[in-house]
Amino acid sequence: IEKRGSIEKTYDDFCAELPESDCRYGLIDLEFETDDGRPTSKLVFISWNPDTASVRPKMLYSGSKEAIKSALNGVGIHINATDHSELDLETAILPTVKKFA
């Protein structure tokens, strides 16, 4: 574990910590409101594998992702992102997460 975020940190703080040219895994507890107005939260596993990363770390992270996912019992939402547009909360993350709410 490289970093742990406190409960006060936001999703934007999480995204700001991701390196531009290196891969990372992240697990977040995302709080949001369902389409019918209920407050809820979901654990979300994010695989950050940017297009700008070199080949070796991209292969290493891609190859080990399934083992990490299987170790995370209770985490049913997995998101793969290769650029920051795929991490946009409103257009990419929430629509995916709300399918499981």
Image (cartoon, helix red, strand yellow):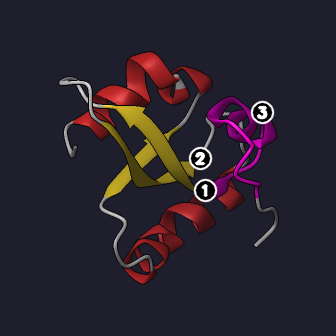
Does the magenta run of residues contain 24?
yes
Q: From the image, tell me which residue sits under label 3.
A: 16
Q: How far across and down, in percent of the image, does residue 17 sit?
A: 80, 41
- Disc on the earlier residue, 1 or 3: 3
Question: Is residue 19 something one can see in this rendering?
Answer: no
Residue mark closest to the camera, 2 vs 3: 3
Which residue is drawn at the image coordinates 53% and 20% (left, top)?
85
Q: How far across and down, in percent of the image, does residue 87 sit?
A: 53, 30
Residue type, label 2 = Trp
Q: From the image, tell me which residue sits under label 2.
A: 48
Report helix, strand or loop for mark 3.
helix
User: Distance of mark 2 from mark 1, alpha carbons?
Assistant: 8 Å
Determine whether, in the image, residue 47 is placed left or right of residue 66.
right
Does the magenta run of residues contain 23?
yes
User: Distance of mark 1 from mark 3, alpha carbons?
Assistant: 12 Å
Residue 26: image tag: 1
Q: Which residues are magenta?
A: 5-25
User: Distance of mark 2 from mark 3, alpha carbons?
Assistant: 12 Å
> Tags 2 and 3 in contact by the CB under 8 Å rule?
no
Quarter of the image that includes the C terminus: top left
